[in-house]
Amino acid sequence: MLAYVFWHGPRAAGASEEYERALIAFHRSLARSLPVGTRATASFRIGSPPWRGAGPVAADAALLADGGYEDWYLLDDFAALGVLNEAAVGRGHRSLHDAAAHRSGAGAGGLYALVEGEPCAQALGDAKLASWIARPGGSTQRALGELLGDGMEPEHASLWRRQMNLGPAPEFCLLARELSAGVGDARLPAGWSATTLARDVVWSG
């Protein structure tokens, strides 16, 4: 399973309420007729994005520094990503997609593959914490990332690994209702770091 993750925010200051209404309308439209291979979608209000500002997208990322939104799209495979891309701006969804897009300012994306857990629409919405884990450049301990899920509840949590470097987000992400022991300071290898952020559900379905 894959997850396409998109971070974004409204273009105009003080436009969050109107922006959220447009987001909800778009996600509801998708839920009524999910594209083939898309299992669930969710949108969260976040306090800050899961990166600390470096690289070519730093200027846009800075626009989200005071808060933004994080959308998750659960997909069966890479083929489903292509179907979602076409369907989001296709018949039945395009006007609502454009209504949200026209209000959007900065944005960044990421593509993640499931390592552990059984995510579904309810589990995705229940995961109020997202722990983002980065390892130091040049590290050869990539396989240790599979141990980050130790102690998590598989029915209510999921561990993800980045597949393509599409933006500034860290390599691993653990979604859970409560902080897992696998991402605690005492468990992480030297040089690895974890940032846990709270999320408020805007839409889940």
Image: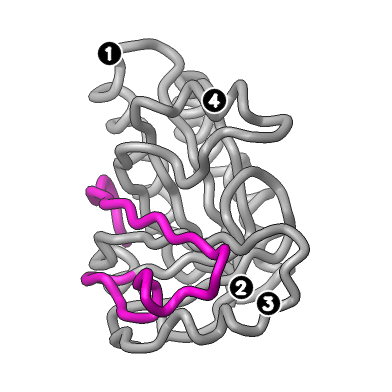
Disc 4: which residue: 106
- Nearer the observer, 43 or 82: 43
Depth check, mark 1 against mark 3: the one in front is: 3
Q: Element under label 4?
A: strand
Is residue 3 depicted above or below 90 in this figure? Answer: below
Mark with earlier residue (1, 3):
1
- For the N terminus, the image quarter is bottom right
The residues bearing labels 1 and 3 have C-alpha atoms spaced at a distance of 41 Å
* Separation of residues labelled 4 and 3 (CA atoms): 30 Å
The kind of secondary structure element at disc 3 is helix
Query: From the viewer's perspective, is residue 189 above or below residue 50?
Result: below
Q: Residue under circle 2?
A: 113
Q: Is residue 83 magenta?
A: no
The amino acid at mark 4 is Ala
Indicate whether residue 191 is drawn in magenta. Answer: yes
Q: Evaluate if marks 1 and 3 touch, with contact meaning CB atoms under 8 Å apart.
A: no
Q: Which residues are magenta?
A: 176-205
Q: Is residue 141 left or right of residue 49?
A: right
Residue at the spot x=37%, y=37% of the render?
48
The mark that comes first in sequence, 3 or 2, is 2
**Spatial distance from mark 4 to mark 1, Cα to Cα?**
15 Å
Mark 1 is on which residue type?
Gly
Give the camera-side residue of 31 and 112: 112
Q: Report which residue position mark 3 lands on.
A: 142
User: Given this view, does label 3 or label 2 mark the residue nearer the observer?
Assistant: 3
User: Contact, CB < 8 Å: mark 4 with mark 2?
Assistant: no
The residue pinned by badge 1 equals 14
Residue 93 visible in rendering: yes
Q: Residues within 10 Å of mark 4 (few under 14, many from 20)?
A: some
Q: Find residue 7 and report its horizontal and vertical position in percent.
A: 49, 40
